[in-house]
Structures are given as structure tokens and as C-alpha cells.
Amino acid sequence: MALHTKWSSGDLIFFDGTQEIFRIKNSDEGIVAGESGEGVDLTFHGDTTGAYFHFDESADLVDFHNIKVTNQDPQAQTSTGANITLTSASNRIQFLTSTGAFNLIVPTSSGAGVAGIEFKVLNSTGGICSVCEGTTGTVIVAVGAGDGTVVVSDNTEWRAILGST
């Protein structure tokens, strides 16, 4: 396969004569590979030998080969009746303990970086934990001692699933 290049509207385009293979955009839209329905395989190699990210277009498969994909560790928090405030950068799993009732404040449901945020909250002991939304203070769900909840923002409002032991 011969690979050709051309410039179009400031974009650098690589093509094989029949389809576009790769495009480096002259904007904030980044890099585009292939065309819808006629994609191409992509492989990005890491610094470690044998570590790579591979997209196989014919199988619609993504392979993180020898690449570590990690999540934040759970965070243990203790309240003495005060508020615990989380941000969009807070750990997604929260283990809470308290001697009395307290509030867990999650970010406002709409705004940059909030859509799809999910917190798993486990109230280990003590009083009721009221999970509240940001500055409005609206209670999303009350979590009793020994219970847990999952709260998720759809960028409009928080939704909760409550479970008990």
C-alpha cells in the first residue's frame, strides 16, 4: 500500500489513494484515524518493551497489552458530625465512619467534569450520612449505618442506588 499526504484546510491528511487513513487536525479536535465504517488498525507503543495500545478495526477491539490500567484506591474518611466534601477529583470509593449524623457533600450535578461521575459510599458505623449536592445542599440519599449507596451524575441531577447489608 502506498501512503500519500496532502494538506487540506490546515489539516495534514494521510491517505492510500482510496480512503483517508490518518488526519492531524489544525484545531483543538486532535487526531482522527480512518473513516466511519472503513476504519484502520492503530497501535501506539509505550516506553516499556511489549507495552502497547492496539485498536483492531475489523474486530472493533481495544487491547491494552502489558499496560497497567489503575483506579484510585478507596479512601477512608472519619466524621465527627461535620461535613465531608468531595470534588470531581476525589476517590470514587469512600468508606465513612462517624459518631453521629453527618453530611457528605458531592459536587453540583451540572458543570464541567461532572457528567458520569460515580461515587460508591459505604457508611461503616455511627449515624446517618446524608449525601447532599454541592452548594444547594439538596439531599440525594440518606445512608444508614452499615448501608451503602452509589450516586451518579448525568450532568443534570444526581441519581442514587441504596443498599443495606
Image: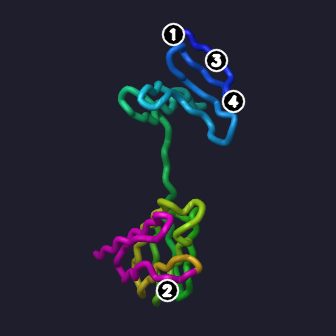
* Magenta segment includes 25: no
For the residues carrying marks 3 and 2, which lies nearer the camera in this image? Answer: 3
Q: Quadrant of the C terminus?
A: bottom left
Q: Which corner quadrant of the image does residue 83 belong to?
A: bottom right
In the rendered image of this protein, does residue 69 appear above or below residue 12?
below
In the picture of the structure, the residue carrying the numbered disc 1 is: 1
Residue found 58% across the figure and 68% down from its top: 87
Q: Secondary structure at mark 3?
A: strand
In the rendered image of this protein, does residue 60 appear above or below residue 150?
above
Q: Which corner quadrant of the image does residue 129 belong to?
A: bottom left
In the rendered image of this protein, does residue 146 appear above or below residue 63?
below
Residue segment shown in magenta: 136-165
In the picture of the structure, the residue carrying the numbered disc 2 is: 102
| Residue 162 picture location, percent across and down | 34, 74
In the picture of the structure, the residue carrying the numbered disc 4 is: 9
Amino acid carrying label 1: it is Met
| Residue 74 picture location, percent across and down | 48, 63
* Magenta segment includes 164: yes
| Residue 114 picture location, percent across and down | 54, 63
**Main SS class of the magenta portion in the image:** strand
Amino acid carrying label 4: it is Ser
Q: CA distance from mark 4 to mark 2?
A: 57 Å
Residue found 56% across the figure and 65% down from its top: 90
Closer to the N terminus: mark 4 or mark 2? 4
Q: CA distance from mark 1 to mark 2?
A: 65 Å
Residue found 39% across the figure and 33% down from its top: 61
Amino acid carrying label 2: it is Phe
Query: For residue 5, which numbered disc appears in the image?
Result: 3
Residue found 40% across the figure and 70% down from its top: 159
Amino acid carrying label 3: it is Thr
The answer to whether mark 3 and mark 1 are in CB contact below 8 A is no
